[in-house]
Image: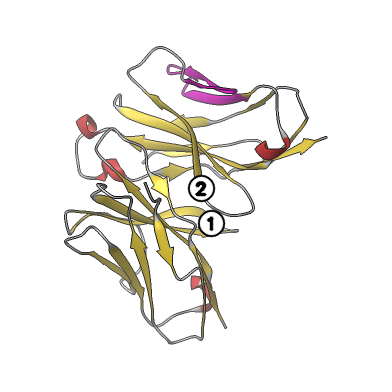
Amino acid sequence: AQTVTQSQPEMSVQEAETVTLSCTYDTSESDYYLFWYKQPPSRQMILVIRQEAYKQQNATENRFSVNFQKAAKSFSLKISDSQLGDAAMYFCAYRRGRNAGGTSYGKLTFGQGTILTVHP
Amino acid sequence: KAGVTQTPRYLIKTRGQQVTLSCSPISGHRSVSWYQQTPGQGLQFLFEYFSETQRNKGNFPGRFSGRQFSNSRSEMNVSTLELGDSALYLCASRQGQGQPQHFGDGTRLSIL
C-alpha cells in the first residue's frame, strides 16, 4: 500500500519570504501522480499543483513550484513571495496511474498535512 | 463553470439515525469520490464512482454506502450513526484518468 508522509506538522513564514514544505511517499509503482492541495479555514480543498511521475521537469504554478526527486520519493512544495492568503493546511497526495493496473487509480492517499502560518 | 456542490453544508444527527449526503460534480466530470476527514485519522478514502459503478472502496464498514446517478450526481449514505462518524465529508470529481480531483466545500456531520 502506498503511504504519504509529511514530517512538518507546522511551518511559519514571513510575508514575502520563501518556505518549503516537505513530503515523502512510498510506492513500488512507476506510474503515479502527486498533488499538493491547500485547505484554508473555509475548508474547501484547493488544488495547488500536480506532478506526473513520468515527467522529469518539476511542475510550476506561478509562485508555487515543486522539487520532485523520484529516486528519493520526495515531493516538496516551495512557496515564493509568501502572501497572507497562503495561510492554510497543506496536504500532499498520491494517486496511482491507470497503467499501474487495478481499479484503485482514482483513490487519493493523503499525508497528515502541514499547517502554514504567514506572518505580516 | 460551477464547482463541485455538496449539500447540506452542516448536519446534526443523533446516534442510531441514518443520513444521506449529496454531491453534484463539475459539469462533464463522470468520476466522483468521497473522503472522510477527522482530526485523528486525517483524510481517508471512502469510495469512488464512475458511470454509476463503484470502482473502488476504502476500508470502512458496510454502514457506509453510496451510489451515482446517470447525471453523475452522487449520494453517500451512512446508517446507524455512531459518535465516531462525526467528520467533514468531502466529495471530489474529476474529468478523466490523468486529471486532478476537484473538491467541494464538504458536509460537516455532527453526531450527538
Residue B16 image point, x, y percent:
44, 87
Q: Residues within 10 Å of mark 2 (few under 14, many from 20)?
A: many
**Residue A69 shown in magenta:** yes
**Amino acid bearing label 2:** Met
Residue at 68%, 39% in the rendered image: A85
Closer to us: mark 2 or mark 1? 2
- The residue carrying mark 2 is A45
- Tell me residue B64's x, y (percent): 34, 70
Residue at position x 39%, y 44% from top? A108
Comparing A91 with A15, the one in front is A15
* Residue A38 percent coordinates (x, y): 56, 41
Q: Is residue B17 magenta?
A: no
Q: Residues within 10 Å of mark 1 (few under 14, many from 20)?
A: few
Location of residue A91 by image quarter: top right
Which residue is found at the position 51% from the left and 47% from the top?
A: A45
Task: Give how far apart the Cα atoms at labels 2 and 1 are.
Answer: 17 Å
Depth check: A22 or B7 in front?
B7
Coordinates of residue B61 in the picture (x, y in percent)? 35, 69
Which residue does the image show at 28% across and 50% down from the upper left? B27
Say which quadrant the C terminus of chain B sits in: bottom right
Can residue A13 be seen at all in this image of the molecule? Answer: yes
Element type where label 1 sits in the image: loop
- Label 1 lies in what chain? B
- Please give left or right for residue A18 compared with residue A33 in the image: right
Residue corresponding to mark 1 = B41
Viewer-closest of A49 and A70? A49
Q: Residue furthest front?
A: B1
What residue span does the magenta drawing correspond to?
Answer: A60-78
Output the chain of dot 2.
A
Task: Determine whether label 2 and label 1 are within 8 Å by CB.
Answer: no
- Main SS of the magenta part reads strand
Asked whether residue A27 appears in the rendered view, the answer is: no
